Image (tube, helix red, strand yellow):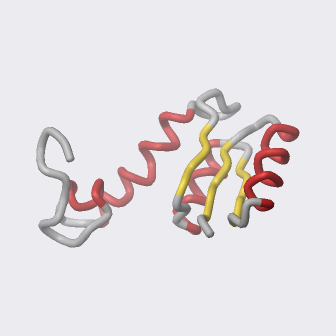
Amino acid sequence: MKRILIVEDNVDLASGLRRNLEVEGHKATVAGTAAAAIETAMRESPDLLVLDLGLPDRDGYYVLEQPLARLQRARADPECARAGGRQGEGIPPGGR
């Protein structure tokens, strides 16, 4: 079971995606705005993000940048924050 965050302001589309993912055995959560998506992502740490780039309050790219920026401020090694690993196990400069 994966925890999936659906970020979509179209209620019908979000509802349909959520239903289909839950039928497949996943835990799906819906957020309709960038602000709600960031709050939910920080609280629930989803395994996957289904992201609408055209949200009413901000674009989807902003949503992607915020959790990373917060993790980077919270940890001493910014490369580690991108990889989600321990200190010194970050993504090497220039790739994976």
**Is 23 placed left or right of 26 in the picture?**
right
- Asked whether, in this view, residue 51 is left or right of residue 10, the answer is left
Res 85 quadrant in image: bottom left
Q: List x then y, in percent, for residue 16.
A: 84, 45
Residue 94: image location, x then y, percent: 14, 39
User: Which of 12/72 is in front?
Assistant: 12
Residue extending farthest to the right is 12
Q: Give the residue drawn at x 83%, y 54%.
A: 19
Q: In the rendered image, which quarter contains the N terminus? A: bottom right
Picture residue at 52% right of the left edge, 63% below the top: 42
Horizontal relation, residue 5 to residue 71: left or right:
right
In the rendered image, residue 52, in percent from the top left (x then y), is placed at 63, 34
What residue lies at 85% left-to-right and 40% top-to-bottom? 11
Query: Where, by quadrant of the figure, is residue 84 drawn?
Result: bottom left
> Where residue 90 sits: x, y (%)?
19, 59
User: In the image shown, does 10 or 33 lie closer to the viewer?
Assistant: 10
